[in-house]
Amino acid sequence: MKKELLELKYFLDEEAERYEHPQFITEDPISIPHRFSLKQDVEIAAFFAASLAWGNRKSIIKSANGIMERMDEKPFEFILNHSKKDLKVLDGVVHRTFNAEDCKFFCSALQHIYKHSESLENAFTSHYDGQDIRTAIMSFRAHFFNIKYPERSAKHVSNPISGSSSKRLNMFLRWMVRSNEKQVDFGLWTKLNPSVLAMPLDVHTGNVARELKLLTRKQNDWTALEELMSVLRKMDAKDPVKYDFALFSIGVNSKK
């Protein structure tokens, strides 16, 4: 490893260590699934929180909390047992371009998956090739859209094959797969290895990565994500997405 990259690794390791800490959970969307203990409740709460993760964090948390409240704080019970008329409780849900129609479809799609499997993990891994995280995401999309769906809802579950960086799904996967040793991520899933995970790349982390010369591509697409991950894996091949904490923290502190 070149000296410049090694020095940057030491710096990012320190930042990641500092910000992967429970005290930062309360102001992050990951606080939503941390309210639950049942595995399926955690999965569902995390999926909705990650799916709404664009815009400011207070708004994301408020919107995700609102959905959990409409489910009487029992997301798995609601998802598994709801009838069509029960979905009326979701009327009025809106978060940017995500609306009640999308939310109702999400509930129906999740119900379909849970009626055939005890965990969302199986939907991600049934067609996973063991190496490329895109195949896990595409496996999930195949299961999720295996029932009739509104065309407008397709954009809320990103497609990396079309070039999307799939920020929200990669965020959800980070939460589910990475170890809970530091009480931030959950480590609920074992069929995916942390080494294959990809960063939740967005405008903020992309800009920080470019400032640090970790990334040259201007677009925040899957090609940029592969470029960034190739560098981060040189720094830590076993757990490259731990640097999400570092890039995010640098971005937040630079605004202060």
Image: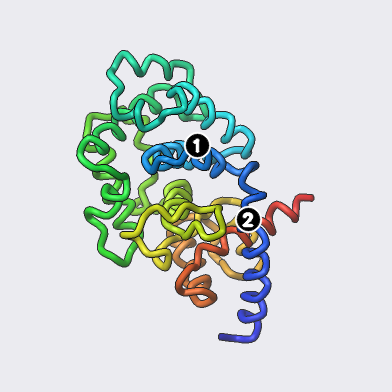
Q: Is residue 114 left or right of residue 88?
A: left
Residue 48 figure quarter = top left
Residue 245 to residue 86: above or below: below
Crowdedness near tag 2: few (<14), some (14–19) or many (≥20) residues, C-alpha within 10 Å = some
Q: Residue at x 38, y 23 (%)?
A: 101
Q: Is residue 95 left or right of residue 146?
A: right
Q: Nearer the viewer, residue 21 or 252?
A: 21
x then y, percent, for residue 114: 26, 37
Q: Residue at x 29, y 29 (%)?
A: 80
Q: Which residue is mark 1?
A: 52
x then y, percent, for residue 17: 63, 65
The label on residue 61 is none
Q: Nearer the viewer, residue 74 or 152?
A: 74
Foreground tag (2 vs 1): 2
Q: Nearer the viewer, residue 51 or 13?
A: 13
| Cα gap from disc 2 to disc 1, whole angstroms | 23 Å
| Image quadrant occupied by the N terminus | bottom right
Q: Residue at x 39, y 45 (%)?
A: 158
Provide the secondary structure element on which disc 1 rests.
loop
Number of marks drawn: 2
Residue 5 to residue 169: above or below: below
The label on residue 21 is 2
The amino acid type of the residue labelled 1 equals: Leu
Residue 167 to residue 15: above or below: above
Provide the secondary structure element on which disc 2 rests.
loop
Sequence-earlier tag: 2 or 1: 2
Q: Can residue 135 be seen in the rendering of this structure? A: yes
Q: Can residue 165 be seen in the rendering of this structure? A: no
